[in-house]
Amino acid sequence: MAIPHPRGHAHLAALVNHESYNFSHRIDHLSFGELVPAIINPLDGTEKIAIDHNQMFQYFITVVPTKLHTYKISADTHQFSVTERERIINHAAGSHGVSGIFMKYDLSSLMVTVTEEHMPFWQFFVRLCGIVGGIFSTTDLDPINLSILFLLRMATQTTTYLF
């Protein structure tokens, strides 16, 4: 079900008797912008059960524009983070407010760009050689000394059998 809402704020509140309120709800899917199958949104599958008829559910959402450029997909979409709050409204106990489901969202002025790049094989090989060479130079070992040390160790090992 699509719910038309003003920019920056949306809420659902019932206009019936307070005793018949039930704001239990399930959010199957909530997204902003182009639908991207690889992105899991934080509110997808959220289910809240109201334990009191005067209960307030609040969602504070920060929306961040996102550009995705990978080998599988290229899209302009939005990601978001959410902070949830719920409380029971009891005016006699000093807990004031309106029962309902409230979604307050803010658009971030920053943009996130996600790109996927693969390193060519030759560049990987050059980096690997640099790492191996760095290990040999910092430990003052060379391949000839390593093979001699290995042979000496093998020659001096003895096997002891206990009966």
Image (cartoon, rainbow, N blue to C red):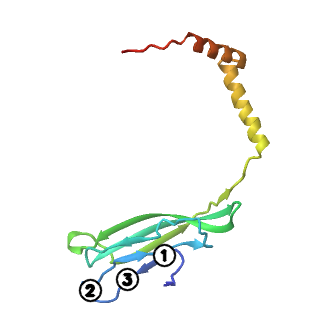
In x, y percent, where is residue 83?
A: 43, 63
In x, y percent, where is residue 39?
A: 57, 65
Q: Which residue is mark 3?
A: 13
Residue type for callout 3: Ala
Circle 3 residues within 10 Å: few <14, some 14–19, many ≥20: few
Compared with 73, 137 (above or below) is above
Circles 1, 2 touching at the beta carbon (< 8 Å): no
Taking the spot 27% from the left edge, 70% from the top edge, the residue there is: 95
In x, y percent, where is residue 61?
A: 49, 67
Q: Which residue is mark 2?
A: 20
Mark in the foreground, 3 or 2: 2
Q: Which residue is mark 1?
A: 9
Q: CA distance from mark 1 to mark 2?
A: 25 Å
Taking the spot 45% from the left edge, 73% from the top edge, the residue there is: 103
Between 91 and 59, which is closer to the camera in this rendering?
59
Q: Say what secondary structure mark 3 lies in.
A: loop
